[in-house]
Image (spheres, helix red, strand yellow):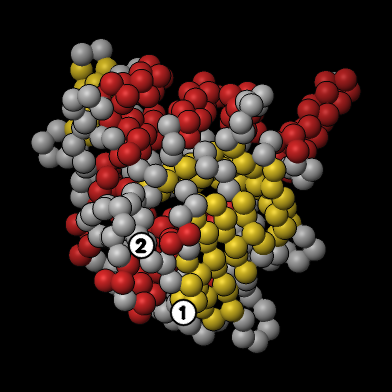
Amino acid sequence: MLKRASFTNLTSVPSAEWQFSSGLNVIVGENGLGKSHVLKALYSILKSLTPDGISVDGTQLERFGKSQLEKRIADELSGNMRPDSLGRLVKRQQGRNRAEISIKFEDKRLNTSFGFATNSRSQVEISDLPHISLNKSPVFIPTRELITLCPWFVPLFDSYNVPFEKSWRDTVMLLGAPSLRGPRETKVREFLSPIEAAMGGKVEVDANGRFFLKVNGGKMEAALVAEGLRKFAMLARLISTGILLEQGYLFWDEPETNLNPKLIRVLAQVIVGLADQGIQVFIATHSVFLLREISILTDGRKKPNSRYFALAASGDEEVSHLEQADTIDALETLVLLDEELQQSERYLDAQENG
């Protein structure tokens, strides 16, 4: 489990220490304050700590060597955040500056700290080297759906210099995994049932790796399905293969995008359910509706399993500050709710004046 992360001078991300829940972690805030950058940075680091192609508990990181691990971290950050050079991720100021990132795990042997300067092009400097690797690889779901990129996107990404984030390639690879069979399929069905009911059908993949939604006895190509339902199809596929239920970490950027309120309710149930299964979930959202649905499902629990982070702009437009708490109500600065209340007041005023 990831317990804490400390960021200093990383883009617009607040220079502060983040205290995470072992279950669900929700980041809210206005555009440009660093929500997505936090998700991508954490995913990049965890991905770099996972051995390629295997996930064996206790694998020694010494086999990478310090310089090799430094390159892995730099490559993941550059591939997922896509700066012109690594130094572009350092917070802007006059003269030279330096970004520092430190992450702490429940297993202290995984603790990692590193930094890089404004003039760094493609290398980080590790100050705290982990002694073991992660035994489970993280999953990153971006804002847009990726079902329609299967199966051609991976060979394109691997063969050409294309302007897409590496996390897209990672997730498309996972979408192509085979579905689970046997005893584990029972757990999968528990999660799939509400998703398939919301989609009105089941996700299928043909021998060529193309995806379809099976509805009313027929098949509909993924490209003809509404984009919001395609995101649900992607979620359903990652669950049916066991990827989400067996991985330790899920990062999801704005999961509510292109979903109507009915689907967002189901989405909230799935997100909370995954966290209850032991997956450490991190999401960034603009949706008050999603926040409230999550709150309805989690408030009042004897043992809190959620953590909320609010980013708000400060006087400097390139700096934000962080507020964190175990419940939504405990956050003093929550721009999303403030804006909704102001809209309600404007609406009531317009009705009275009309």
The residue carrying pointer 1 sits among few (fewer than 14), some (14 to 19) or many (20 or more) residues within 10 Å by Cα, namely some
Amino acid type, callout 1: Glu
**Badges 1 and 2: C-beta atoms under 8 Å apart?**
no
For image coordinates 25% across by 35% down, the residue present is 241
Residue at 46%, 55% in the rendered image = 107
Taking 224 as reference, is 87 above or below it? Answer: below
Along the line of sight, the residue nearer the viewer: 276 or 86: 276
First in sequence: mark 1 or mark 2?
1
Quarter of the image that includes the C terminus: top right
How many C-alpha atoms fall within 10 Å of the one at disc 2: few (<14), some, or many (≥20)? some
Q: Residue 111 carries which label?
A: none
Q: Name the residue under label 2.
A: 132
Compare residues 110 and 338 and report the one nearer the observer. 110
Query: Relative to residue 220, is residue 167 drawn left or right?
Result: right
Residue 23 left/right relative to 350: left
Residue 331 location (% of width, % of height): 75, 41
Query: Which image quadrant for residue 101?
Result: bottom right
